Image (tube, helix red, strand yellow):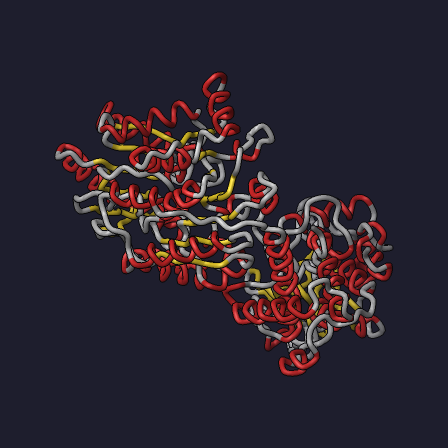
Amino acid sequence: MRSENLNPLFASIQSLPSVGAKRARLIAKALAGRGAEPGAPRVVDLLWHLPFSVIDRRKRPHVAALSPGEYATLALTVAHHEPPRAPNRPYRVRCHDDTGEIALVFFKAEPRYLLRILPVGEKRYVSGRVDSFQGTLQIVHPEYVLDEAGLKDLPLVEPVYHLTAGLSGKVLGAVIREAVSRVPELPDWIDAEMRAARAWPDFGEALRRIHTPEQPGDIAALAPPVERLAYDELLAGQLVLALVRAQLKRGRGRSVTGDGSIRTRIRAALPFSLTASQETALDEIAADMAARERMLRLLQGDVGSGKTVVALLAMALAAEAGHQSALMAPTEILARQHFATIAPLAEAAGLSAALLTGREKGRAREDVLKRLALGDLSILVGTHALFQAEVEFKDLALAVIDEQHRFGVHQRLALTTKNSHGVDLLVMTATPIPRTLVLTYFGDMDVSRLVEKPAGRQPIDTRVAPLTRLGEVVARLGRAIDEGARVYWVCPLVEESDVLDVTPAETRFAALKEAFGRRVGLVHGRLSGKDKDAAMAAFASGETAILVATTVIEVGVDVPEATIMVVEHAERFGLAQLHQLRGRVGRGRAPSSCVLLYKPPLSEPARARLKTLRESDDGFFIAEEDLRLRGEGEILGTRQSGAPGYRIARPEVHGGLLLAARKDVQLTLARDPQLLSSRGEALRTLLYLFSKDDAIRLIGAG
């Protein structure tokens, strides 16, 4: 149970004196855009809404020393008021000091209010952003107008928060300070020596220094108060992953070993030899499956590194032991692509395999489910349909999940609990992920990396060109498809947008169809499964030579004859995503190329991304650059259920803290697996503060 002294932090924000229903709705909108938990905000949610900047009001210059664009706090004498002469004109108050004059400007002003706060002839302290209008210095809507007595309440270093329409920074700041005042004195969950070595404040003091900073540097990512909270968040995340891992590994009960017979037949059917890292990964997987606890392994490999073959050989091992396997993919296109790769090899080895997606209906679906329950199927490939209760395995031993960041922890657990003996778990990702992010998103897993590309993979010539050369690109494509080439053309959107000025897939399809007729196809996420399959089949067979698409083809699409990839508005894609798209070509024997079309002018980050892609095809190097340039959000794509979504910690900045947090958790749980010691109790408090209640229920369960 949560300690009672935490209850005030888990009350609704409307329990704060200054927050009514209307203000609560505005604050909820501001927090929702910054990674807050869904639902009505609680006081604790305000603590994690950190400022992204500050306004330094300590500067007290004379008027003569002012420059437009700076914030300043001025000691002024009010000279006279100038009410507007016409509607919609501003109200001006002329003020001065010994060195010059400045105007205070108000729109939709209430004259009596302004006369009261700015009486003629009196001295006032005014703070705000200085601008210039027609050669005259002015401050539009000063943020503070104070007399001598009120000056003591002026925040000299004022935090700046992400807001929403109708909510001012002054109001939100005051509400957050109310929330901070509710933080009780708590036992520290960080080791005292570590705190002292890093000069970190205690938890409450860290919050106070961030939300009421004394220096602009107090809110910097590497400042002690922010580092402290970042470590708290990372420590909570690593503790959750460790507890989930312990729960999954608890009660394994059996080892899975095979005689190698089926794997030998599959290897004989392969048209290539396995790479050294594939062999290493297979050895690691076999050792995990032979152990008497559940395997939790991440198989990480660049585009085309041969993850599916490794997964198939792992599933063959399970079949040798008389057990079943499941391979789950996030999209139907990817599930069908995996099945197309696996089915002929499985058949050559005498293995029975089937496909199950939402599209399989009626008698065909019933037949698959019946064979699965009887044990006549060794391998089942599918989508989310595999989670359903009606999907019953006779003896599931291995679950392979592709692109796991698109699935949540609960979905992972749902598949691995389809056997009372426990199910080994192998997760695959085609996105090379830097070490710090592996720990962040997959910290509960052991990792195998495929670092080589299989023999025969072609290098890809990558070019970058402005959209002004579009006509030249289209003309060259015409010559290429006349010679038998096949081309992907990727657009960022399906249809026209009122917000983004980019060419959508449907418009580009229409334009290319006008030029090349029936040789152009279209595929995107809004098409029905049947129409997607038809478009992909037409492209794979050569019936169409150009396939206009959205990023639905980013992973899993394998057409060896495709040798040209065109990405339109490449500046709008992340590095990892562009690398994935480029990996759709270079899969056959012919030389391949990738053309990245951009709309000038390029921002510096976009220019750096395109330069990196042009100069390197090493997915792990590209992922590290992506992390440096863009942060963790871009590496794994749009955050979905199951991704941590840290609100304070930034893996690209706090990577060292992440490693320290992981080591801390390992040592702590080795000594105190039930978190019963005084530090263990403090760590339970930490989990509650970061809304990790589910993890607390795992302690001692099972």
* Residue found at x 51% / y 56%: 291
* Residue found at x 27% / y 60%: 615
Q: Position of residue 353 (x, y in %)?
A: 40, 32
| Front in this rendered view, residue 556 or 474 | 556
Q: Position of residue 354 (x, y in %)?
A: 42, 30
Quarter assignment of residue 141: bottom right
- Examine the rendered structure and indicate whether residue 232 appears above or below residue 8: below
Identify the image quadrant of the N terminus: bottom right
* Left or right: 671, with 459 as reference point: right
Q: Position of residue 365 (x, y in %)?
A: 48, 22
Q: Residue furthest left?
A: 483
| Front in this rendered view, residue 607 or 481 | 481
* Residue found at x 33% / y 54%: 278
* Residue found at x 42% / y 35%: 335
Res. 171 visible in picture: yes
* Left or right: 269, with 48 as reference point: left
- Examine the rendered structure and indicate whether residue 474 appears above or below residue 390: below
Q: Residue furthest front?
A: 259
Q: How many marks?
A: 0
| Front in this rendered view, residue 503 or 340 | 340
| Front in this rendered view, residue 329 or 285 | 285
* Left or right: 181, with 655 as reference point: right
Quarter assignment of residue 40: top right
Q: Position of residue 58 (x, y in %)?
A: 68, 76
Res. 575 visible in picture: no
Q: Residue furthest top?
A: 363
